[in-house]
Image (cartoon, coloured by chain):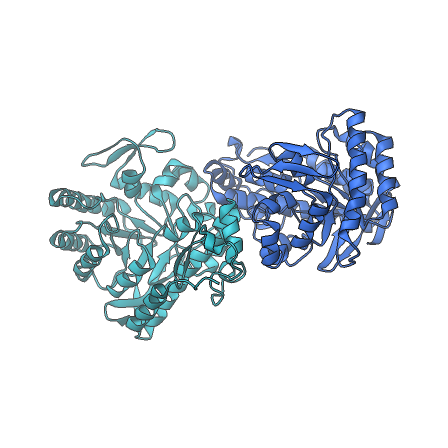
Chain colours: A blue, B cyan
């Protein structure tokens, strides 16, 4: 990756892949099962997303990695000819799958769809990600929910390090695709450092920070970033997995993180929640029912500008598909707008002022009632 | 309306409204509750729809006609600055509402949403349609499902004629908006003629043919058109309500019908069904699961050209919102493509050949399996 500018620990640059360039700091919309829910792929691209995420767990179960490969890979399948990052599947095995059994070699689990039994190992995860032909692939790791005992966190971190080694071997020597290792270590600073240094010694194309935003307070997450990021190679991208709220993102960028993914903007959009410069709005709330004002007419995307709050409220209350379509669009547009602002501010050496201004907007809150 | 060309009984022309021109024969996508389900309004327009339909029944219950009026009318509310036709609400009272009681003056019914009691009369229906500010408004009528006794059909037709008179009076003298009467009379030719002549004597801006496609075979529907259309004024638009399948549309156009609306393309799209030049495809069917071919790549709309059948199958099976979004888009595009073909064929005096060619495509059926 090339770093064009830094501002404190924050940095902006470009990560080059065979399918195109990723501007960092980057937010990656989540395309769980080969679709960013309620969005056409052209729309996601037009909002400024350089890369989307695909979930190995979902895709291996349906339609199956071998089928996607036979159909030309995930880019062709999902009509997204731009970079794709896939996770390893491990996180969702832990959060979604039925009965599961972890051993040194991998994890056996039951599909949440039909109860069928499947197995993921570091090698099989990389094989699936190769079948999907992801541009950026992740090692299989074990992510522990916090709070957890030091013993449990340490065991999972050590296992993840051994799996990192096997993942590197399984990935092979290709330079056309990238493999990221994943730092674990829970809320234990020394374990985080041991994990980061262990991964750096193996050598990856990028480093993810996993096991955060899994139940701990924000200050714990930020403290772990303060500890972990300096232990990672400065010339490689850093990816904070599954994060997060806009406020988490601006704070993590200040600590040197380059990449993010999160289901919040898409999931919230399907549940009637709009992200704006002035915080989150629940469009189901009756106070919007007769409000002719748009969400935020200064923003140049249609859902924020061309539809009244009253109409959005009506769509949400009526269960109309257009509600999720418009609010997801708005939320992803807001996230990409935020990332573009972050990149410009770092490039111009005014990141602290940008963060202060952005937080002042969130703190101001929504428009007063009419 | 101006009639630019005729070919047999078929005709093509333009119907002018204060908000724009409607090319006929026209298919009107159904925007039930102020949204054509799973479509952005700009998309509906871009496909060639000159007019959409709004349902008085749905909108009077939620968000309420007075609220829509306070918000600037349905065009502003739904972000559709083009012509809108509203129905009278009567049909959905009969098909959706709970407990209902019809009397000479109107109908009292319970909302299917919350059981609350409401009343529609010819005057209140027109008042609601004025609050919505519809460009084309419909008289309240009583539609009888077939089969029904002659006595029942006759009673409902006579009541509808009396309501037509009251609707005309309630509509008033405005020339900026249009009011259509509705022919009833079930499957009884003499009653259809009596209804059509009665409405023509009152005088409307257009004439709808109601009470068809309500359970009777297609040949009965077409026979009723053969009977009814010649009894209607030649210089006014004729609208066959709630119709229909593509095959119904081409046959009705051949009999002199100018306007259509139907939920089929949108509803089918949300249920995994694609309309194509070669008939309907159920994308849930396992034969599509590994098929890399698009629906019909000769068509110039994205859902037909840019996505594989395997992907559409995957989206439908996975319950992804994008399934309904892509298939609704495809189906409305196909319907508008069909209407454009119909208009061009009539203008060029080759409508019979167009119908034969179109039917040959449907009869050919889908591509053979790979």
Q: Quadrant of the N terminus of chain A?
A: bottom right
The x, y position of residue A201, in whole percent, is 88, 45
The x, y position of residue B235, in whole percent, is 24, 64
Up/down of B236 relative to A88, above or below: below
Q: Quadrant of the C terminus of chain A?
A: top right
| Residue A107 visible (yes or no) | yes
Q: Is residue A77 left or right of residue B221?
A: right
Q: Is residue B124 left or right of residue A318?
A: left
| Residue A43 visible (yes or no) | no
Q: Quadrant of residue A334?
A: top right
Q: Nearer the viewer, residue A317 or B168?
A: A317
Image point 34% across, 63% down: which residue? B24
Q: Nearer the viewer, residue A170 or B137?
A: A170
The x, y position of residue B156, in whole percent, is 17, 43
Q: Is residue B233 left or right of residue B18?
A: left
Q: Nearer the viewer, residue A165 or B208?
A: A165
Q: Quadrant of residue B106?
A: top left
Up/down of A306 relative to A310, above or below: below
Up/down of B131 relative to A44, above or below: above
Q: Nearer the viewer, residue A191 or B19?
A: A191
The x, y position of residue A20, in whole percent, is 72, 59
Disc tally is 0
Image point 83% across, 49% down: which residue? A236
Q: Is residue B161 left or right of residue B21?
A: left
Up/down of B97 relative to A338, above or below: above
């Amino acid at each position: 990756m090339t770093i064009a500018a830094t501002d404190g620990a924050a940095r902006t640059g470009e990560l080059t892949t065979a399918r195109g360039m990723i501007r960092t700091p980057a937010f990656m919309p989540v395309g769980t099962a080969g679709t960013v829910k309620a969005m056409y792929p052209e729309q996601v691209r037009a909002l400024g997303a350089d890369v989307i995420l695909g979930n190995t767990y979902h895709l291996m179960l349906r339609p199956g990695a071998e089928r996607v490969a036979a159909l030309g890979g995930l880019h062709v399948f999902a009509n997204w000819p731009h970079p794709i990052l896939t996770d390893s599947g491990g996180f969702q095995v832990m959060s979604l799958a039925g009965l599961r059994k972890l051993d040194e070699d991998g994890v056996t689990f039951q599909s949440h769809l039909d109860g069928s039994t499947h197995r993921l190992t570091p090698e099989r995860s990389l094989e699936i990600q190769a079948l999907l032909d992801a541009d950026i692939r992740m090692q299989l790791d074990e992510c522990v929910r916090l709070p957890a005992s030091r013993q449990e966190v340490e065991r999972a971190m050590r296992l993840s390090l051994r799996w990192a080694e096997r993942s590197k071997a399984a990935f092979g020597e290709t330079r056309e695709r990238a493999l990221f290792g994943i730092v674990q270590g829970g809320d234990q600073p020394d374990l985080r450092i041991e994990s980061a240094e262990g991964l750096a010694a193996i050598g990856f194309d990028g480093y993810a920070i996993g096991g955060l935003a899994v139940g701990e307070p924000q200050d714990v997450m930020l403290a772990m970033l303060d500890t972990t990021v300096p232990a990672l190679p400065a010339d490689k991208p850093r990816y904070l997995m599954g994060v997060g709220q806009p406020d988490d993102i601006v704070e993590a960028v200040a600590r040197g993180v380059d990449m993010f993914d999160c289901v919040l903007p898409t999931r919230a959009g399907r549940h009637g929640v709009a992200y704006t410069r002035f915080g989150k709005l629940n469009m189901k709330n009756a106070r919007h029912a007769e409000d002719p004002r748009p969400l935020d007419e200064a923003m140049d995307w249609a859902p924020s500008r061309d539809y009244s709050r009253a109409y959005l409220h009506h769509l949400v209350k009526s269960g109309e598909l257009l509600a999720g379509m418009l609010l997801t669009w708005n939320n992803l547009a807001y996230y990409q707008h935020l990332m573009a602002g972050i990149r410009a501010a770092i490039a111009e050496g005014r990141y602290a002022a940008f963060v202060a201004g952005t937080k002042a907007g969130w703190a101001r809150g929504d428009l007063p009632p009419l």
